[in-house]
Image: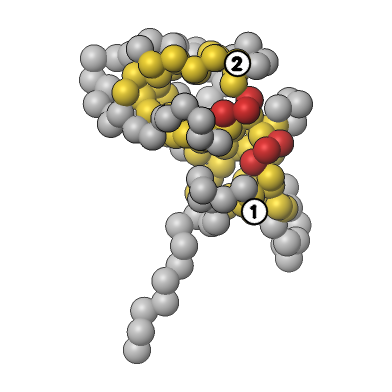
Amino acid sequence: MATRYAPPIDRVIARYQDGLILKGHTTDFLPARDRFHLLGVDSCPGTPPREILLTDLKGVFFVRNLDGNPAHLKRNTFEPTNVSPGRRIRVLFKDGELLLGMSPSYRRGQAGFFVTPADQRSNNERCFVVAAATQEVSLL
């Protein structure tokens, strides 16, 4: 009997450029596609997943848990133990938020790229940054 493949389920927070935040799970996020589907944490059983267009987003944040840690103080510093692959990067979003991290895939002109936050205690494991939502991106 063949083993059936089940796609991984990612916990994500979709942050829109207008400030809207949606939390839930996805099984079909691919950086090369312009959309994915999100099953919200507050969805009723049987509710179909919501289609999310990347062009509307600031970023897709892949998180450890959907509740976060309100007591955590965000630190935008690189720790000596940070061995994430890629180059150090500084991302300034149009809304003023600053993200420091490591990016294995940043290239100018792409629609988006992944960043592993410098703050290893952050709830964010990695972020897919939508380039159109950034004001400035610099390699450090």
Amino acid of disc 1? His
- The mark found on residue 135 in the picture is 2
Q: Where residue 86 sits in the image (x, y, percent)?
A: 30, 29
Label 1 and label 2: CA atoms lie apart by 27 Å
Q: Earlier in the sequence, mark 1 or mark 2?
A: 1
What coloring was used for the rendering?
secondary structure
Q: Residue at x 57, y 28 (%)?
A: 131
Q: Please give left or right for residue 23 compared with residue 28 in the image.
A: right
Above or below 76: residue 26:
below
Q: Decide if residue 120 is in sight here.
A: no
Crowding around mark 1 (Cα neighbors within 10 Å: few <14, some 14 to 19, many 20+) is: some
Spot the residue most to the front. Answer: 109
Amino acid of disc 2? Gln
Crowding around mark 2 (Cα neighbors within 10 Å: few <14, some 14 to 19, many 20+) is: few
Of marks 1 and 2, the one in the foreground: 2
* Label 1 sits on residue: 37
Q: Residue at x 56, y 41 (%)?
A: 12
The part of the image, by quadrant, that contains residue 22 is top right
Q: Where residue 20 sits in the image (x, y, percent)?
A: 74, 31
